[in-house]
């Protein structure tokens, strides 16, 4: 059932996925900002008499496509809706259903005309910025800001719904953001304190669950209106953040009281936090504050404001929804400025986003699958969760950035039957994807069975790059760096706490500049590049390069994991192996905590297809399940740093460790800076004689991907 493993690198599975996604269309409709929905939409520009020409809206083009398909039920050639460059503001989602889709021979394509910039936006441009004249407002602002902050009346420009700040974060639903402000295509900062970094909790007089915590200094004494001030922090663990509303501030006792149910896991001395939505802290260029009572938006622009510079997000739903549609291609579009997500694909097959930019969104860029709203809890509660993601749906060569709650949620396949989904994220650049929710909202969140993440660059995030759930996924040729920048006990690639999630392969990826950034006493703040947490099992880690990559591979109590033919350079350690099922996590195996066993039983682990796909699984409960058996660490190179860290009595009598080059110079072409030559080995390298196979460094990341289109 591991559908990817039979394919050699370089050929890989794209041909299986993409051969039926042809883009040749002969029937054309046109949409333009200068169009008119009363016209035919058959011409790219208005005629001389302005009696015919392109449509004005995507919705009219959708109707025209439907009508044309009804008139030509045996259509053998595709349809393209060409969209001229410009802005297309949506106040409701463009919902494409089975009626709007195409076929393998005749796909329906919505594409940018001649590669022009087409903005599909859920926002609204605002103008008429004025100096502040209200003395009460000026008095509340920091003195240095008073000559720079401008105001804009949103209600006078037809904006009445400002949204609300809500509780969000670890273990909480993904929800639309309130209205946000963007300046020249970049998100601005809701006024906060401190401006950079964090304050720390100084005391918890009522205990961790008491709903109050202490702060140092007198800054909160300046805050006049505490009715809608919020705090965001890592309240107990540096891998779990949440937003909490302030109930009151006791400036005499230096205590902040929050609205129940209070911070996730409670408050702990030394934990990090900051306050936001505070007018008195509008103290630097790029900060803003919205008075929801008056509808006045206050903003310190980082540069003089020109026409078209300022936009606010309005639409709370996805901008584009594909529901049980098939063979639809979105090509070259910029999808932006919504309070919710960019695109949601539920059901259907062979749908594709290609060459699109998805940015400045309050939630995430794309979900292939339903039930994303409560994603984290839904998957944790139901190991068999099927998000109805369809098959062979994907994202190719897209740019995703400045999203609020992750990049892509990639589902597909059925865990009960191990049927693969064949959905994919390929050749994309994904970065800065946690503006709001900092933890467990990865660059790509993958679930189900048999999906693909390949040739992407994922970087600049506080927590995970890839968060995996499910079976038989392939993660290959990705360039992953500068993640886990604001968290501890974290993994760039992370999976765990389910013995049945097997058959996953992590190969030919480049993990670099992934190292601890958080230091706190009496807490594990390590950062892992490949984190097989809480008995994660049956994972192949092959042919990766780990360079300054923290703890490169952690085997956290799991079984049947293979760590082979990897290059570890300056990692600490290269590999960690523990037997937590025999120590602090023994309750998972002695009957006190049923989490692992119940998940095994849910998939009928000792019956086909699981018993056939994963032979060691069928008899696992009679085979010392708490002991990390059948792990292999072979044919690896380790240079600098440390090699293996053993915990809980683990050793090389339990784990197979052989043919690794650890104490011998491997023979890099450029030994002082091996990264400059792509970690190439000399022809006489002792590693090659030992059986190490060269890693195709030049094929890693978007540069290594060549589209079949």
Image: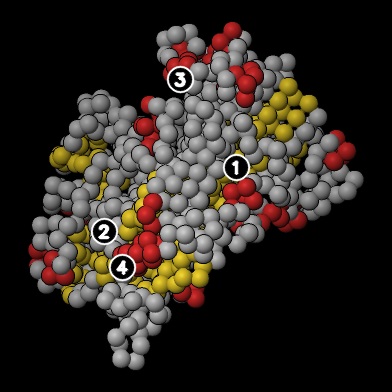
635 horizontally vs 78: left or right: right
* Label 1 to label 2: alpha-carbon separation: 35 Å
The residue pinned by badge 1 equals 475
Coordinates of residue 440 in the picture (x, y in percent)? 42, 39
The residue tagged with tag 4: helix, strand or loop?
Answer: helix
Give the number of the disc on residue 60. Answer: 4
Q: Quadrant of the C terminus?
A: bottom right
Of residues 283 and 319, the one nearer the viewer is: 319
Residue 155 visible here: yes
Give the number of the disc on residue 92. Answer: 2
Tell me: residue 168, above or below residue 125.
above
The residue pinned by badge 3 equals 602
Of residues 234 and 17, the one nearer the viewer is: 17
Q: How was the colour assigned to the protein in this rendering?
A: secondary structure
* Label 1 to label 4: alpha-carbon separation: 40 Å
* Label 3 to label 1: alpha-carbon separation: 25 Å
Foreground mark, 4 or 2, reads 4
Ranked by sequence position, the earlier of labels 2 and 3 is: 2
Tell me: residue 103, above or below residue 155.
above
Coordinates of residue 322 in the picture (x, y in percent)? 38, 52
Ranked by sequence position, the earlier of labels 3 and 1 is: 1
**Residue 94, quarter of picture:** bottom left
């Amino acid at each position: 059932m591991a559908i990817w493993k039979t394919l050699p690198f370089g050929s890989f599975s794209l041909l299986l996925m993409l051969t039926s996604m042809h883009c040749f269309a002969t029937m054309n409709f046109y949409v333009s900002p200068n169009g008119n929905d009363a016209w035919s939409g058959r011409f790219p520009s208005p005629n001389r008499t302005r009696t015919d020409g392109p449509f004005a809206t995507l919705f009219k083009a959708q109707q025209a496509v439907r009508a044309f398909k009804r008139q030509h039920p045996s259509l053998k050639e595709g349809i393209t809706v060409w969209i001229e460059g410009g802005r297309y503001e949506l106040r409701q989602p463009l919902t494409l259903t089975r009626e709007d889709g195409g076929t393998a021979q005749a796909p329906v394509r919505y594409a940018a005309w001649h590669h022009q910039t087409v903005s599909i936006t859920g926002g609204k441009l605002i103008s008429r910025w004025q100096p502040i004249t209200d003395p009460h407002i000026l008095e509340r602002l920091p003195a240095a800001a008073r000559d720079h902050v401008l105001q804009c009346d949103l209600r006078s420009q037809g904006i009445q719904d400002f949204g609300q700040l809500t509780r969000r974060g670890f273990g909480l639903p993904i929800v639309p953001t309130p209205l946000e402000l963007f300046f020249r295509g970049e998100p601005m900062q809701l006024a906060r304190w401190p401006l950079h970094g964090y304050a720390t909790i100084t005391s918890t007089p009522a205990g961790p669950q008491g709903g109050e915590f202490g702060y140092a200094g007198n800054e909160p004494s300046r805050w006049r209106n505490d009715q809608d001030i919020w705090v965001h922090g890592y309240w107990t663990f540096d891998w779990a953040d949440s937003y909490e509303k302030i109930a009151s501030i006791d400036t005499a006792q230096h205590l902040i009281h929050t609205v129940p149910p209070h911070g996730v896991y409670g408050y702990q001395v030394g934990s990090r936090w900051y306050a936001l939505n505070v007018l008195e802290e509008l103290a630097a260029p790029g900060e803003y504050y919205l008075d929801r009572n008056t509808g006045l938006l206050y903003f310190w622009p980082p540069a003089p404001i020109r026409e078209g510079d300022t936009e606010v997000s309005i639409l709370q739903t996805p901008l584009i929804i594909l529901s049980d549609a098939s063979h639809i291609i979105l090509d070259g579009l910029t999808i932006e400025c919504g309070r919710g997500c960019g695109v949601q694909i539920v059901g259907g097959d062979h749908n594709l986003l290609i060459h699109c930019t998805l940015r400045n969104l309050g939630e995430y860029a794309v979900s292939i699958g339903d039930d994303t709203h409560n994603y984290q809890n839904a998957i944790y509660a139901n190991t068999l969760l099927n998000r109805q993601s369809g098959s062979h749906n994907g994202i190719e060569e897209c740019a995703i950035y400045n999203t609020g709650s992750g990049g892509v949620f990639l589902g597909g396949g059925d865990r009960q039957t191990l049927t693969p989904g064949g959905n994919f994220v390929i050749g994309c650049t994904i970065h800065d994807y946690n503006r709001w929710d900092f933890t467990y909202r990865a660059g790509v969140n993958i679930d189900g069975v048999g999906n693909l993440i390949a040739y992407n660059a994922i970087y600049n995030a506080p927590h995970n790059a890839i968060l995996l759930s499910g079976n038989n996924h392939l993660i290959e040729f990705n360039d992953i760096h500068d993640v886990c920048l604001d968290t501890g006990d974290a993994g760039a690639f992370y999976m765990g706490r389910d013995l049945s999630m097997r058959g996953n392969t992590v190969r030919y990826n480049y993990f670099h500049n992934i190292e601890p950034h958080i230091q706190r006493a009496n807490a594990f703040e390590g950062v892992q590049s490949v984190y097989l947490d809480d008995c994660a099992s049956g994972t192949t880690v092959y042919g990766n390069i780990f360079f300054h990559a923290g703890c490169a591979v952690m085997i956290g109590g799991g079984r049947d994991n293979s760590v082979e033919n990897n290059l570890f350079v300056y990692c600490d350690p290269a590999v960690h192996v523990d037997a937590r099922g025999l120590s602090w996590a023994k309750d998972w195996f002695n009957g006190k905590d049923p989490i692992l066993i119940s998940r095994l039983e849910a998939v009928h682990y000792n019956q086909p297809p699981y018993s056939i796909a994963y032979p060691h699984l069928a008899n696992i409960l009679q085979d010392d399940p708490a002991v990390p058996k059948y792990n292999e660490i072979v044919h690896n190179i380790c240079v600098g740093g440390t090699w293996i860290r053993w915990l809980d009595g683990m050793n090389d009598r339990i784990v197979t460790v052989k043919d690794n080059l650890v104490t011998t110079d491997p023979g890099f072409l450029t030994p002082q800076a091996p990264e400059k030559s792509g970690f190439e080995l000399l022809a006489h390298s002792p590693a090659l004689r030992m059986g190490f196979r060269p890693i195709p460094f030049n094929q890693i990341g978007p540069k290594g991907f060549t589209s079949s289109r």
